[in-house]
Image (cartoon, grey):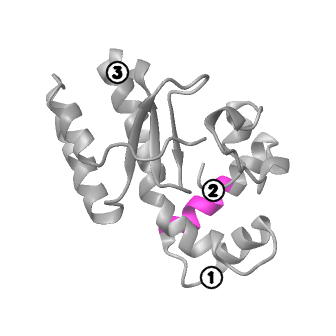
Amino acid sequence: SLVNGGKDISFLTEFINKLKNKKHIAAMNQIIADLRTKNPDVRFVLMEIDGADGVYFSINNTVYLNKKIFKNEKKAMTVIGHEISHALTQADIIRYVTNRSEPTYREKLSAAAFDKNTPLHIQSLINVYLHSANHLGFEKHIGKIVTGANLSEAPKVSTGEYAFINLEE
């Protein structure tokens, strides 16, 4: 099952204290500021993950990081930044897409893309997502339900396919 608990944003402060690159330190300080404003309750769990460097699950607002990434500062920064981008956009995606009343995920996306109340950054994200899925041949993966109770139950699809199951990916 998903590991409950984890560390709060202070984990990032601990990470910053170990960084050597000044640009990485500045970037992490900005990430912390953004998280404190937009998603202060996000949790971090360090663990061994087969086949992934990191994963964000909105169901428990937790970023899971593979312990191995911390052997390389640049790798750790890349993975942390990527997973936190999910945590930061999650609230808006849920509000303006996922929680809509349309019966299918495709219909929710279409409606949100043309809804004047949907913020421009979410409309842009929808447009890029749909255009990319169409162009890359991944339309069939849009809206696949992922309900893995643990990380090993993630869909057995390529990284490219997985990226198109929903807007959050």
Would you name the residue on which mark 3 appears?
A: 70
Residue at position x 72%, y 72% from top? 108
* Mark 2, secondary structure of its residue: loop
Residue 103: percent from left, percent from top: 81, 75
Would you name the residue on which mark 2 appears?
A: 167
The quadrant holding residue 39 is: bottom left
Amino acid type shown at disc 3: Phe
Numbered circle sitting on residue 115? 1
Nearest to N terminus: mark 3 or mark 2? 3
Residue at position x 46%, y 28% from top? 47
Q: In the image, which is nearer the foreground, mark 3 or mark 1?
A: 3
Q: In the image, which is nearer the foreground, mark 3 or mark 2?
A: 3
164 vs 3, left or right, is right
Amino acid type shown at disc 2: Leu
70 vs 90, left or right, is left
Q: In this view, does 157 lie above or below 135?
A: above
As measured in the structure, the alpha-carbon distance from the residue carrying label 2 to the one carrying label 1 is: 16 Å
Q: In this view, does 71 lie above or below 32?
A: above
As measured in the structure, the alpha-carbon distance from the residue carrying label 3 to the one carrying label 2 is: 28 Å
From the image, which quarter does the N terminus lie in?
A: top right
Q: How crowded is mark 1: few (under 14 residues within 10 Å), some or many (20 or more)?
A: few
Q: In this view, does 21 lie above or below 9?
A: above
* Mark 3, secondary structure of its residue: helix
Residue 151: percent from left, percent from top: 62, 36
Amino acid type shown at disc 1: Asp
Tag 3 and tag 1, C-beta contact below 8 Å? no
Numbered circle sitting on residue 93? none
On whether residue 127 falls in the magenta region, the answer is: yes
Q: What stretch is highlighted in magenta?
A: 121-129
On whether residue 93 falls in the magenta region, the answer is: no
Tag 2 and tag 1, C-beta contact below 8 Å? no
Residue 127: percent from left, percent from top: 64, 61
